[in-house]
Image (cartoon, helix red, strand yellow):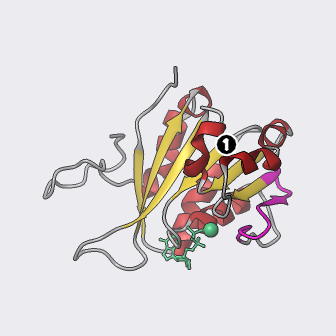
């Protein structure tokens, strides 16, 4: 059975804020962690990896690995940055050598990872970035949903809550017109 925890909801209004949030989360990172990044093109998945990597002390520029499939960066923990957008078949995932990457003492972040969940371990942090719509929203506003799946991230749920507190938003299912509660899991 998969253990699921509450989803945390954050909001950012610039790429820098998304990167800062990701860097704050990186403080919690442990060897063998998997982060699944979901969200449409341009939502900020790569931006998130950039911030997360910076939080781990990576100094070289982090770019989209769309054409290379996987890139590694040296930091407090090695960052394995994957983008499976162009994978045609689930079978191709085998070529990534994912279990080796997870076992080598680093962290693995996979853009579009939600597309390959059947071949991923049931132990990851899902980060879902969405554009926000509505009259109050600006182009740079993003909603970021953080959903720990499995024991590894569930253990760190309270730390997660604290890490994202500066960007916390009301629960996603808050009825229209209700004031934001801030920081509460939904
Ligand atoms: P993805 O990897 O999801 O396709 P990128 O991270 O490559 O997206 O691009 C996100 C784009 O959106 C960048 O141009 C970034 O500057 C812009 N942007 C604007 N506001 C935000 C925000 N709040 N969070 C992340 N990116 C943002
Ligand atoms: Mg990207």
Task: Name which residue lies at 52% across and 51% down.
Answer: 127
Residue 118 lies in the magenta-colored region: no
Q: Quadrant of residue 180?
A: bottom left
- Badge 1: residue crowd in 10 Å (few <14, some 14–19, many ≥20): many
Magenta span: chief secondary structure: loop
Q: Tell me if residue 60 comes above or below residue 176 in the rendering.
A: below
The residue beneath circle 1 is 34
- Among all residues in the image, which is located at the extreme left? 177
Magenta part of the chain: 64-79
Apparent side of residue 85 relative to residue 174 in the rendered image (left or right): right
Q: Tell me if residue 120 comes above or below residue 55 in the rendering.
A: above
- Residue 75: x and y in percent read 83, 55
Apparent side of residue 181 relative to residue 82 in the rendered image (left or right): left
Exactly how many numbered labels are in the figure? 1
Which one is in front, 31 or 40?
A: 40
- Residue 108: x and y in percent read 73, 48
Badge 1 marks a residue whose secondary structure is strand
Give the position of the C terminus as an image quadrant. top left
Task: Name which residue lies at 73% across and 72% down.
Answer: 63
Which one is in front, 75 or 91?
A: 91
Q: Tell which quarter ligand 1 is in.
A: bottom right
């Amino acid at each position: 059975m998969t253990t699921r925890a509450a989803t945390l909801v954050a909001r950012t209004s610039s790429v820098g804020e998304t990167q800062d949030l990701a860097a704050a989360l990186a403080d919690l990172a442990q060897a063998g962690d998997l982060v699944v990044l979901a969200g449409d093109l341009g939502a900020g998945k790569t931006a998130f990896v950039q911030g997360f990597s910076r939080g781990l002390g990576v100094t070289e520029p982090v770019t989209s690995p769309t054409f290379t499939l996987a890139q590694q960066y040296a930091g407090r923990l090695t960052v394995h940055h994957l983008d499976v957008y162009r994978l045609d078949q689930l079978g191709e995932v085998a070529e990534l050598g994912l279990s080796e990457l997870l076992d080598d003492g680093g962290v693995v972040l996979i853009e579009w990872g939600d597309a390959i969940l059947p071949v991923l371990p049931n132990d990851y942090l899902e980060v879902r970035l969405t554009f926000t719509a509505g009259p109050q929203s600006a182009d740079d506003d993003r909603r970021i949903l953080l959903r720990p799946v499995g024991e590894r991230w569930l253990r760190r749920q309270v730390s997660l809550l604290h890490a994202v507190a500066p960007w916390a938003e009301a629960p996603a299912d808050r009825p229209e017109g209700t004031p934001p509660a801030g920081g509460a899991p939904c």
